[in-house]
Amino acid sequence: MKLLIIIIFCLMVGIMAAVGDTTGQKESKPHVEEYVGIHPNGVAMPLGRILLARKGSKYCAMKLTETWTGETKEDIFTNYESYYLGDSTGDFSNKNVQFTKGQLAERRAIMFFKILLYTTGPENDEIKCGRMKLFCLQNVVYFYHVGRPSKKDFLIDELAPTKWTDISQVNVFDPRLKWYRDEMRKSIKIPIDQLWEDGEDRK
């Protein structure tokens, strides 16, 4: 029995040493498709495009700016930028807008004969946006914490994908925006250049 414990301990130490800290390593970039994914419980966004979130009269504009893998393709790291507007004006040019830069981190779980030996992730699955938080895995932003016991405590009310790449372009009252709530619907993919039917890239 003692021998088995020693063997398992050595395996754990070896695995932990092999995994290491990959936060600063940008070994390879996963393929990120240029489409918006509309799902029943969230929205997937391509890099560099702004996603709007609304909670009551408060707004958040965020975008994923960079993503890469660590030692394995399951170790995924993503940088993001967010802008929080805590009033109902919808004007992101106001001086009261709060800007945040952060990083999301997901890491693999290590299993041994269906026994969980080691995991470090997800280390950070929340996009911080002022007083709002957005639950995000890879490039999908969800309305609530996936996997939590209850979906009643929604982090956000609605999400609206956009073509915009810069905060100066954002207009939360733009009639082309389509706001989505958590509801049953078929998941679809929309190429980013077809997100708005009129094809205009007006600011």
Image (cartoon, rainbow, N blue to C red):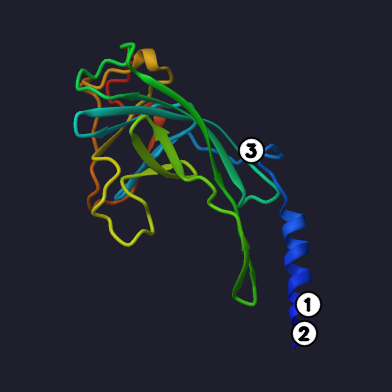
122 over 113 or under it: above or below: above
Q: Which residue is mark 2?
A: 2
Q: Is residue 113 left or right of residue 122?
A: right
Q: Is residue 40 or residue 78 the one in the foreground?
A: 78
Dot 2 amino acid type: Lys
* Nearest to viewer (mark 3 / mark 2): 2
**Which sits earlier in the primary sequence, circle 3 or circle 2?**
2
What's the residue at 20%, 17% (across, down)? 89
Tell me the quadrant of the picture where the C terminus can be found: top left
Q: Which residue is mark 1?
A: 6
Dot 3 amino acid type: Lys
Local SS, label 3: loop
Q: Which residue is mark 3?
A: 29
Q: Is residue 39 left or right of residue 46?
A: left
Q: Residues within 10 Å of mark 2 (few under 14, many from 20)?
A: few
Contact flag, marks 2 and 1 (Cβ < 8 Å) = yes
Local SS, label 1: helix
